[in-house]
Amino acid sequence: MLPAWVGWINLLYVPLAFVVSLVLQGTLAAITAAVYARARDLHWTARARRVYPLLALARRLSTMLCVLFGIGALLSVGPASHVGRGVLIPAVVAAILAGSFWPSWRLARRLRAASPPDAATWLRTYAFGVLLRSPYYLALGLACVFPSKLDTSVVIGLVGAAAFVVFISMGGFVRLGRCLGVLVAPPERLATVAASAAATAGVPLRAAWLARVGFANALALPLSRQIVVNAPALALFDDPELAAVCTHELGHLAEGSWASLSRMATVFAVISLSALPPLWGSFGARAALLLIVLVIMILCAWPFVSRKLEHRSDETAHRHQALPGTYARALEKLYEHELMPAEAPGRGSHGHLYDRLKAAGVVPDYPRPAPPPRWLQGGAFALMYLLIGPTAAAIGVAVTLMSHSQSPMLLQLSIGLFGRSGAPFDALAELHLQDHGDVSGAIDLERRAIAVSPASNEYAMKLAYYLALGGQCDESRTVMTGALSRAGEARRKWRVSYLVESYGRAWSARCEGTAASSAPVRSSRRP
Ligand SMILES: [Zn+2]
């Protein structure tokens, strides 16, 4: 009935997602590079103020594209698809990440001209990012395979995800990082500095690791008592500064277990969103809304807890720094290197650099900078809309035009790319009957239309009509009786009347052995 390619054509979303991501991220990266070039000679705080909103926008753009293409891919999986959402959606997300790789790498080489990352380093940077967000990718995968109602598979999936979060927190992050070649044993300098910082602060440290990635930062893994320092940070800091940064991370290792539990709870709250569709399916929209509100509350509360923990770790670093001002200097170098604004748009999870410097007893030799201008943030959002809006609109218009076309080819394409809509199946069934007189083909296509739109009485009536034409009288009668009883008041509408009349004729011709023209059937007549 349908050519084989219809079942596979939704794989087209994967290269499409790649190209759209490549073009949009490429455009954004070119704009960011131009803004950076114009701001190059300004004080670093002014430079970061201009460039940061665009860098943040690039991250949001990837998330937005994942949402857009994820929804498209989800709606494409219908009764004719061979490629399920469990394969298609992860593939689309991977394509969006892959599409952003080249533009972001080129941009990173321009922004960090002194030590440009090579392609392998940037690939590891991506792997590091995926590893950091692995619980969220797992949640996405679960959302793709969870059924529409709560059952044991949902419970097993959520328990498995919780176990994965515990595994990652308890040392799995380092194990996976080492398998990927992102984390390696520390060079002697880092090992020595980290060990002496641990001895000075009196915090037991199991291990320090080097992350071979393209941006400077450091990371604590409190539950496994390990710290990670990114390779560019080694080049950026002298020994006392490196020790101060390590001491800040050691401060996180000294946090109580409630802090680690809160971190894990925040991650798990996001993962629980993967169970939204089954929750909705079993307990209705209110239960789903309750979960969303709960997760939003947890996510809104987390920055307050996080800022408190960061403040405490900052104090640990001040207390044990080699000379007054060492830690503040390291922080400022880090923000300057990573183009992070000294005064962020929101307070975030770490607070403003300017406040952190003042808390360290260092008053910067420049006035408190303003946060990135609001018009720039607003402009960045407008730019994102301008980049995404026409793309989404073009795809939407193309899909709508295809599903209402009279061309079998375009209808088949629409079924392959937008299989969750009954309209193209229904239209194709009609065309199939008109052009080939193939009743069984029309019946099959109409059944598929009903499979995606089970509430449609129109499709049910058409199926009854095709069944009557095909001489399958018993099923035809059952389907029509059901559709008419559901149609209720709507039976008076001309479309329903027309369908019932056509059905009556087909019924008379095939199931009563009467000529269709000699026995016109009124719309109210039931078989
Ligand atoms: Zn910290």
Image (cartoon, rainbow, N blue to C red):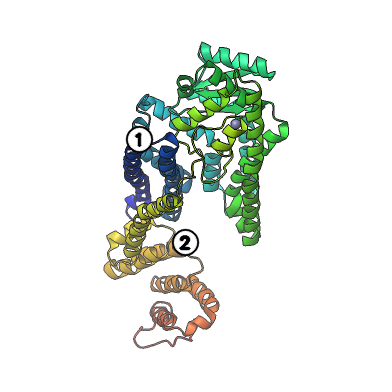
Q: Quadrant of ligand 1?
A: top right
Q: Secondary structure at mark 1?
A: loop
Residue 277 visible to the viewer: yes
Coordinates of residue 154 in the picture (x, y in percent) = 62, 46
Q: Is residue 331 above or below residue 406?
A: above
- Total numbered labels: 2
Callout 2: 10 Å neighbours few (<14), some, many (20+)?
A: some
Gap in angstroms between the C-alphas marked 2 and 1: 56 Å
> Circle 2 is placed at which residue position?
452
Disc 1: which residue:
40
Q: Secondary structure at mark 2?
A: helix
Q: Position of residue 498 (x, y in %)?
A: 40, 82
Q: Nearer the viewer, mark 2 or mark 1?
A: 1
Q: Is residue 213 above or below residue 354?
A: above
The residue under the point 57% across, 24% down is: 325
Is residue 440 in view from this perspective? no
Residue 245 vertical placement versus 279 (above, below): above
Quarter of the image where one finds residue 280: bottom right
Quadrant for the N terminus, please: bottom left
Give coordinates of residue 46: x percent, y percent: 42, 39
Which residue shows up at 49% across the image and 41% down it? Answer: 369
Position of residue 275 in the picture relative to residue 16 (left or right): right
Q: Amino acid under label 2?
A: Val
